[in-house]
Amino acid sequence: MKLGYLIDMDGVIYRENNLIDGAAQFVDALISSGTPFLFLTNNSAPTPEDLAVRLKHLGINGVSPRHFYTSAMNTAEFLSETHPNCTVFVLGEGGILTALHDKKIANDAINPSYVVVGEGMPTMEKLTKAHECIERGARLLATNPDNWCPVGAQKTRPGAGSTAAFLESSTGRRPYYLGKPNGYMFHRARRKLAELALGNPHDVVMIGDTMETDIRGAIEAGMYGFLVLTGATQLEAVGDYVYQPTRILQSVADLTDEIKTGKVSDRLNSPVYSHSGFHGGKPGNRHQTDVLAHFKPRPRPAMTK
Ligand SMILES: [Mg+2]
């Protein structure tokens, strides 16, 4: 059975500027076995070229810009397909500006068709400008719904979702979110993976560390969703979700041998299932509106809406 892999980056391959143990060997195994793969990230700030250089500095070789698909590229494809000749006012940096430029979508700070929110640190002045554009009729769109993003073991930063929430609050307009878990992101990623593989893989596996984006999107798109515990999700929290990962892995290193040998494991002999006694239904920390939550440390808000 020929599998193709879609792989999230933050919390899967690296955390901050540290490579996750075994990630380099995992990518080596994909490349040497000729297994099709594509890195799929909701971070709209870097370009594919930036990401390839970043991986190289972290010690991962053999990856080129064509191995990346970002929420910025997804947003530009969505706009050029659904609304050719539209114009945009952008809150964001790097990757989203480049992706829109590549699709020949013009910037317009006076009367744009869309305000596009990406990752970045907007000034109050730019937020005010975006607010005014929306008041004049621009539609509100965000590259990804992440309210916060991990930048270290105990540290987060505000994400594009929180910038979009600011504008939703000030204008009363609801944003439309591209990026994971939006089906358009997975549909386009599958198509790009097939182009790289010169044919459709029989099945596609999404590997990610976030339930609300990686696993939810994969399951809804009819793919396998493999959760790794090296990023945003703790094992105890998995039972809280309606949708469940196909497999739970300590890290991508658990897959290296399978990829080398071509022998695919199933969920029952997946390392976490067999060693922890986890059966998928264990209740973890509940949402903060639950009564019992008053007696527990306050959980983080959901990563997305
Ligand atoms: Mg991640």
Image (cartoon, helix red, strand yellow):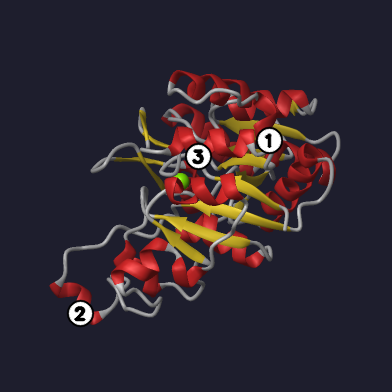
Q: Position of residue 276 (x, y in %)?
A: 29, 69
Residue sitting farthest toward the left: 295
Residue 293 appears in the picture as rendered: yes
Q: Which mark is residue 73?
A: 1
> For mark 3, does the 10 Å Cα neighbourhood hold few (<14), some (14 to 19), or many (20 or more) residues?
many
Quadrant location of the N terminus?
Answer: bottom right
The residues bearing labels 1 and 2 have C-alpha atoms spaced at a distance of 42 Å
- Residue at 68%, 35% (x, y): give it: 73
| Badge 3 amino acid | Phe
The residues bearing labels 2 and 3 have C-alpha atoms spaced at a distance of 41 Å
- Observer-side mark, 1 or 3, equals 3
> For mark 2, does the 10 Å Cα neighbourhood hold few (<14), some (14 to 19), or many (20 or more) residues?
few
User: Which residue is denoted by mark 2 in the rendering?
Assistant: 292
| Badge 2 amino acid | Leu
Q: Element at badge 1?
A: helix
Q: Position of residue 41 (x, y in %)?
A: 56, 41
- 141 up-or-down from 205: above or below: above
Q: Position of residue 190 (x, y in %)?
A: 73, 50
| Badge 1 amino acid | Met
- Residue at 21%, 63% (x, y): give it: 298
Q: Which mark is residue 26?
A: 3
Q: Element at badge 2?
A: helix
Q: Position of residue 207 (x, y in %)?
A: 53, 52
Whether residues under marks 1 and 2 lie with C-beta atoms below 8 angstroms apart, the answer is no
Q: Which mark is residue 212?
A: none
Q: Element at badge 3?
A: helix
- Residue at 55%, 40% (x, y): give it: 131
